[in-house]
Image (cartoon, rainbow, N blue to C red):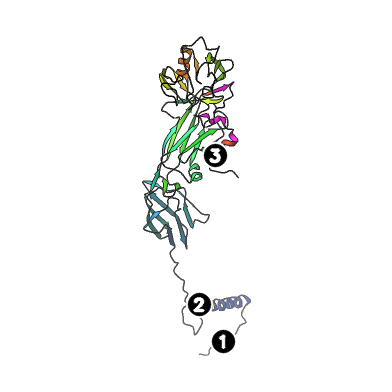
Amino acid sequence: MNITSRWRKPTAGLALLTAACLVASCSGGDPVPGGSGAPDATTSATPQAPTIAISPAQGSSQVSPEKKIVVTASGGTLDEVTVEGGDEEVTGKYNADKTRWVSQGRLKPSTAYKVTAKSGVTTAAGAFTTLKPERELRVVDVTPNRKGEKLGVGAPIIVTFNQPVTEKADVERTLRVKAEKRATGAWRWINDTVVIYRTAKYWPAHQKVRFSADLEGVKAGKGTYGVQDYDTTLTIGARVISKIDVGKKMMYVYRDGKRVQTMRISAGNGTTREYTTTSGVHLTMERGNPVRMISPGREKDDPEYYDVMIDHAVRISNSGEYVHAKNNVWAQGVRNVSHGCINSRPDQAKWFHDTMQRGDVVDITGTDRELEWNNGWGFWQMPFTQWKKGSAIKEP
């Protein structure tokens, strides 16, 4: 059989298809004649797992409570960080890309901490122990602050520690005073164990004031750390201000701006400085019924010696001054005959004794002997601009 083949010119479409096929073959499509019959092989590296670093290092001891816990991730981000110590969880913050976590606040002394962290498939854990202080710092007293007590508008907050404080600024930064009615105030260190808070103006009356000391973990001196926080609420009562004019031998008591008592009084006779009533802003400090009063620095054979029991006495200084009852009604409102105290009619002195709040203001005028700022609670005798200079935190 004769076979005759005829060549025909390919159409444009077929030419394009052929070209496309050639291109496909060259780029790894259908195998080209003479090829291996398989596409070119490719390889990729396995991703490396993230690594986590924890500070303080595993097994560390004697770690300072001021030290921060730092967790970092390399090759990934931190999914979770948990720190526990003393049955409490430590809070912290991540940086913007979550590759670093830093604890907030101070750690507790003498406490074991456990740290766990996760980043992708990686989990890390660590443990360390904080140091045991040589001396433990605590608040041992806050005055005035008896249970259920209402305080006067002049009341200070006197805080006493059980250990000397040399790092005063660091300790002072832990002390907080938060009043329901805003009042500006400042701390003043009296010595290494006592610091006192006083407002610039009298407290607004009828409110709660919260005092707290976030002492745990704060360094107070060489080998001294706070080991216990402190928190209490004080109650400010009525605004009671007594005004005494020694020259006029009169005392006026005002409660929340209204006069509630007018009293004839007899003050110090003024023959010596010792027997001169001090002028200035006093605060009521304590009361007693009766109170034993003994002449200071005098022997029994001294004509000026006395040892007597006095009814309904309210202390207003540490130099022996009281507002108290006495039966010398003939002198009250007429002559000053006392050794420095303010005496008044027994029934009125009883009323004053029974209604006083520690921290009430007793403002005395009319003598040439000024009350010292550190005589009793004479803190209002110091201008506030001077008072706040006793703070360990220096303003810029």
The front one of 299 and 90 is: 299
Element under label 3? helix
Q: Is residue 370 left or right of residue 220?
A: right
Q: Which mark is residue 390?
A: 3
- Residue of label 1: 5
| Quarter of the rendering containing residue 368 | top right
Between the C-alphas of marks 2 and 3, the distance is 91 Å
Between the C-alphas of marks 2 and 1, the distance is 29 Å
The reply to whether dot 2 and dot 3 touch (C-beta < 8 Å) is no
Instruction: Tell me the mark number nearer the camera, choosing from 2 and 1.
Output: 2
Instruction: Tell me the mark number nearer the camera, choosing from 3 and 1.
Output: 3
| Magenta span | 362-385
Near mark 3 (Cα within 10 A), the count class, few <14, some 14-19 or many ≥20, is some
Compared to residue 246, the image places residue 128 above or below, namely: below
- Residue found at the very far front of the displayed protein: 301
Indicate the quadrant containing the C terminus: top left, top right, bottom left or bottom right. Answer: top right
Element under label 1? loop
First in sequence: mark 2 vs mark 3:
2
First in sequence: mark 3 vs mark 1:
1
Q: Residue at point 52% right, 37% down?
A: 187
- Residue of label 2: 30
The reply to whether dot 2 and dot 1 touch (C-beta < 8 Å) is no
Element under label 2? loop
- Residue found at the very far bottom of the displayed protein: 2
